[in-house]
Amino acid sequence: MRARCLLRDLRDALGETAVKTDPNEISPYLVDWRGRYSGTAECVVEPRTAQEMARVVKTAVAHGAAVVPQGGNTGLVGGGVPSNGADGRTQVVISMRRLNRIREVDPLDNVIVTEAGVILKHAQEAAGAMGRLLPISLAAEGSAQVGGVVSTNAGGINVLRYGCTRDLVLGLEVVMADGAIWNGLQKLRKNNTGYDLKQLFIGAEGTLGIVTAVALKLFPLPHSHTTTFIAVPNPDAAVKLLRHLQAELGDSIVAFELVQRACLDLVLSSVKDARDPLSERSPWYVLAEVSATMKGLSIDDLVEDSLASAAEQGFVSDAVLARSAAQRAEFWRLREEITDAERRYGPSAKHDVSIPVSLIPEFLAKADDAVRSRFPEAKPIAFGHVGDGNIHFNVLAPVSDTEAIGMVVYDLVSNLGGSISAEHGIGLSKVDLLPRYKDDISLTLMRQLRLTLDPLQSFNPGKLVHVRPLEN
Ligand code: 2HG
Ligand code: ZN
């Protein structure tokens, strides 16, 4: 009876077609793309404006239902799908799909304002059409949406040069738990009038409010790129190579990705037409991208000279520069296909961790040893954004071993002063682990914030942080 009223009120608020209940139609919204997390929902709603979003929230709250905002459903921690453990409450999935207007691209203020459901790639293209760069870039950018990028504080490949999403957001529009629309969509680079409220919602995984629009910083488009696929003997050499290149080329190094040979093998064996760019096998590789924002610079020559001197010092065993846009795309495809190739191979335990860059070699050696000795069948494969200390230490292993492997890896990360989530977030996958690795004062503050901004716990229940400490 209650659910029928909820549906009727949602339809009154949004119109018939924007409230979906057909099981076939809504089933893709109830499970994450890896098939690891799923739950049930009364319906999927598709608001088209912030005002409609406010109506959805008010209606759901009035019925005691919970709302689960969902963007492109490309997340890796189960943050965007309904949970099974929402205390038996009715859940409404909010698809951001139709909230998809680019409101403004302003090349003078270097700002783009997009709604939350805009696909990241479309936002990049809109900025590019005005001669500007939106630097947030990740493998899932063809389906990830801006609202999800903000709500997970996504990282990606360009963090080394441009920072993560948190550093790139100038303003937000957010629907609060009481249905109020907070217009914090400012374009200012400086605003020292108290708490930086937008930061609360960035990386909050939809637990404090629902982001409906975002103002993001834009940058000059680079005039040229040099992309190079480099064989390195070990991770220690990769870190030394990074510092060597930075000393010579400064912050023109945009991306610096580490790839273990096992990742390349996975991609080569499952991606059509993929081929090894180098003739000899190497245990580790770096994919680096250097870009020049100044006109007329021949960076290929500078990069070649720097790689030659790095080779003399033993940091590089071989390297090849992309000689065309197609080859550049090919190098990046080898890196970006790792996640899909890993999924095709079978189940894996994912560890999206952050470590001080200097400790990455120690972490990789210790984690590899610890996992292989305790789980002889498991196969660690490591890759990631070594330039900013973010390693994806994934382990091909049965789902039943995921938790135990996680404990081994995360304890090591914690002992090295790292974080159990660098860029993917907490979602459902790490919500029970967070109290083990985060200090009590932080947890208390997070709970207080959550209860203050969403007293009835209507936003994305069961994700990110439990509002009450877990019983031991
Ligand atoms: C990447 O860096 C993504 O490609 C996905 O963050 C990482 O699949 C993963 O674990
Ligand atoms: Zn990543």
Image (tube, rainbow, N blue to C red):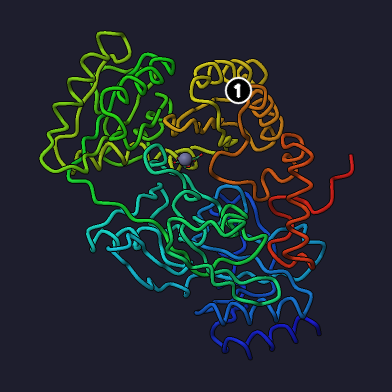
Residue 290, how many percent across, how many down?
26, 35
Q: Which amino acid type is marked by label 1?
A: Glu
Locate residue 453: give its quadrant.
bottom right
Locate residue 213 relative to residue 31 in the image: left or right: left
Residue nearest the observer in this picture, 276 or 133: 133
Q: Residue at x 35, y 36 (%)?
A: 255
Residue 52, how many percent across, how many down?
57, 82
Q: Is residue 233 above or below residue 116?
A: above
Residue 471, how many percent across, how many down?
89, 44
Q: Residue at x 51, y 65 (%)?
A: 172
Q: Is residue 336 above or below residue 366?
A: below
Q: Mark 1, residues whose alpha carbon is within 10 Å: few (<14), some, or many (≥20)?
A: few
Q: Residue at x 51, y 22 (%)?
A: 360
Query: Which residue is at the far front?
Result: 193
Q: Which residue is mark 1?
A: 377
Q: Answer yes or no: disc 1 within 8 Å of ligand 1.
A: no
Locate residue 187 relative to residue 450 in the image: left or right: left
Q: How many marks?
A: 1
Q: Quadrant of the N terminus?
A: bottom right
Q: Quadrant of the C terminus?
A: top right
Q: Is residue 294 above or below residue 91?
A: above
Q: Residue at x 41, y 20 (%)?
A: 239
SS at mark 1 in the image: loop
